[in-house]
Amino acid sequence: MDNDMSAGENRRREVKSAAKKSAEAGGVPPRQQFGRPAPIRSRNDDDRRGRRSRQEASDQDKLLWKPSTMLVPTPVVLVSCGGRAEQPENIITVAWAGTVCSDPPMLSISIRPERFSHGIIAATREFVVNIPTQDLAKATDLCGMKSGRDTDKFALTGLTRAAGASVAAPLLAECPLNVECKVRKTVKLGSHDMFIAEVVAVHVSPTLLDRRGKLCPEQARLLAYAHREYYGLGRRIGFFGFSAKRPGTPRRR
Ligand SMILES: Cc1cc2nc3c(=O)[nH]c(=O)nc-3n(C[C@H](O)[C@H](O)[C@H](O)COP(=O)(O)O)c2cc1C
């Protein structure tokens, strides 16, 4: 994704120059052109005097941007791989990850072919998705900055290997959730190849369970990723189906 970042920079330059040309050619209203945010255009004098709030202005005057990967937030995960078929063990940070099927449980990760981990996963056809906590934000970023081609990321980050149940790839002991996966399909998409994988085992730290054994994700202090920034998850604001519950009906657990 670091290449995506420089691509973004190039795109910003392109758009800036396109906007300049368009202004020189008489100007196209921002709504009709793709691009980075043009300044919010005032509709009347009140706007110029700041009488409408910024929120009101943004609701009414959406800006039309170029197509981009704008789905936010995404998870950010540490994918560990290797350990079989003569492949070295490695860790890669991945934000293009998602759940894609409930039964069988499946997820996807998208990785650029030039990544060291891509070759490892293509050869072993397995990996582990390790869910980092906020305390692991720095290690998560580091594993996305260095390549396993020339760096031992276990030594670099101090992350500890643990044995999996169904795959040879190591789990990362410090992550409270580890999801073992076997690749079922690889889809070439363009910049990235998507590995669609079946979940074959899940490891859960007891620290995430309440007294009745229910998973409490908030106890994991999970990380999210949005537009090149890391975030801690905020407070819980509801539960599945809460909108349809009658007042006073207890939550089914
Ligand atoms: C927050 C973050 C998210 C990233 N997401 C992806 C991703 O989804 N796919 C990808 O190919 N690279 C992604 N990267 C870049 C790789 O993690 C990075 O190039 C890494 O150094 C590759 O390691 P490797 O060469 O050892 O496989 C991400 C990097 C960061 C910091």
Image (cartoon, rainbow, N blue to C red):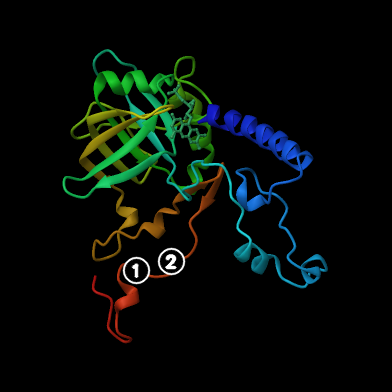
Determine which of the numbered discs, if any, sits on residue 236 in the image: 2
Residue at 34 percent of width and 55 percent of height? 208
Q: Is mark 1 within 8 Å of ligand 1?
A: no
Q: Position of residue 51 (x, y in %)?
A: 77, 73
Amino acid carrying label 2: it is Arg
Q: CA distance from mark 1 to mark 2?
A: 8 Å
Q: Check disc 1 and report its element: helix, strand or loop.
A: loop
Q: Is residue 84 above or below residue 246?
A: above
Q: How many numbered discs sit on the rendered protein?
A: 2
Determine which of the numbered discs, if any, sits on residue 239 in the image: 1
On the image, which quarter does residue 123 sit in?
Answer: top left
- Answer few, some or many: residues within 10 Å of disc 1's Cα (few below 14, many 20 plus, some between 14 and 19): few
Amino acid carrying label 1: it is Phe
Q: Position of residue 243 (x, y in %)?
A: 34, 75
Closest to the observer, 189 or 239 = 189
Closest to the observer, 158 or 104 = 104
Contact (Cβ within 8 Å) of mark 1 with mark 2: yes
Q: Check disc 2 and report its element: helix, strand or loop.
A: loop
Q: Is residue 83 left or right of residue 17?
A: left
Residue at 64 percent of width and 62 percent of height? 58
- Answer few, some or many: residues within 10 Å of disc 2's Cα (few below 14, many 20 plus, some between 14 and 19): few
Q: Position of residue 104 (x, y in %)?
A: 16, 45
Q: Is residue 37 left or right of residue 227?
A: right
Closest to the observer, 221 or 38 = 38
> Does residue 82 show up?
no
Residue at 42 percent of width and 25 percent of height? 112
Q: Position of residue 49 (x, y in %)?
A: 83, 68
Quadrant into which the C terminus falls: bottom left
